[in-house]
Image (cartoon, helix red, strand yellow):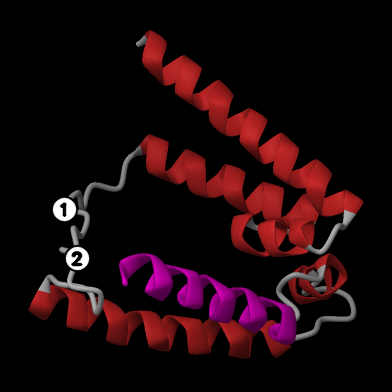
Amino acid sequence: MSLLISALSGLIFGLGLILSGMANPSKVSAFLDLAGAWDPSLALVMGGAVGVGLIGFARARRRRIAWSGDPIELPTNTVIDARLLGGGLLFGIGWGLGGYCPGPALVAAGSGSGEALLFVGAMLAGMALHDRLIARR
C-alpha cells in the first residue's frame, strides 16, 4: 500500500510540475528575470506549494504517521550554518543557470528532453562528488 501511495503521489506531483510550467526552463528563467520580462505566475505556484506544505508539515508534527501508516521523521536540526547557506546558494545558482531544480528536471528528463537529461546527469555527478568528499572527512 505504501508503494502505491508513493507512486500516486509522485504521479500527481509530476503532473502538477508539468501543468504549472515548473518543468519548462524558459518559464523558470522568465520568473527569475526580475529586471526584464518578468513572469510572476510561478510565484503563485510556489505560494500554493508552500500552503500545501504548511498543512502537510503541521499534520506531520501532530500525528508523526503518514497516510500509509509509515512513521514520519522530521528534521530536528535548526542551525543555519555555512554548509546550509552554501548549499542554498549552489541550488539557486544551478536553478538560475539551468532553469531546473531536481524535481522538475526529473520530470522533464522522463519526457526525453536532452537538456534535462544532461542536467540530471550533472546533478547526479555532483551528488556523487559530494558523497565522496564528505566520506573522506
Q: Is residue 38 toward the left or the right of residue 128 in the image?
A: right
First reached walking from the N terminus: tag 1 or tag 2: 2
Q: Which residue is mark 1?
A: 76
- Quadrant (top left, top right, bottom left, bottom right) of the N terminus: bottom left
- The crowding category of the residue bearing disc 1, from other C-alpha atoms within 10 Å (few below 14, some 14 to 19, many at least 20), is few
In the displayed structure, 122 sits above or below 135; it is below
Marks counted in the figure total 2
Q: Is residue 61 toward the left or the right of residue 38 in the image?
A: left
- Assess whether residue 11 is covered by the magenta stretch: yes
In the displayed structure, 12 sits above or below 70; it is below
Q: Mark 2: which amino acid?
A: Asp
- Expressed as whole percent of the image width and height from the top left, the position of residue 31 reads 76, 76
Callout 2: SS: loop
Q: Is residue 26 toward the left or the right of residue 52 in the image?
A: right
> What type of secondary structure mainly makes up the magenta span?
helix
Q: Nearer the viewer, residue 63 or 100?
A: 63
- Residue span colored magenta: 1-20
- Which residue is at the far front? 1
Location of residue 127 by image quarter: top right
Residue for point 40% across, 19% down? 134
- Expressed as whole percent of the image width and height from the top left, the position of residue 130 reads 51, 25
Q: Nearer the viewer, mark 1 or mark 2?
A: 2
Q: Mark 1: which amino acid?
A: Thr
- Expressed as whole percent of the image width and height from the top left, the position of residue 51 reads 40, 88
Q: Which residue is mark 2?
A: 70
Residue for point 88% across, 75% down? 36
- Expressed as whole percent of the image width and height from the top left, the position of residue 23 reads 74, 70
Location of residue 85 by image quarter: top left
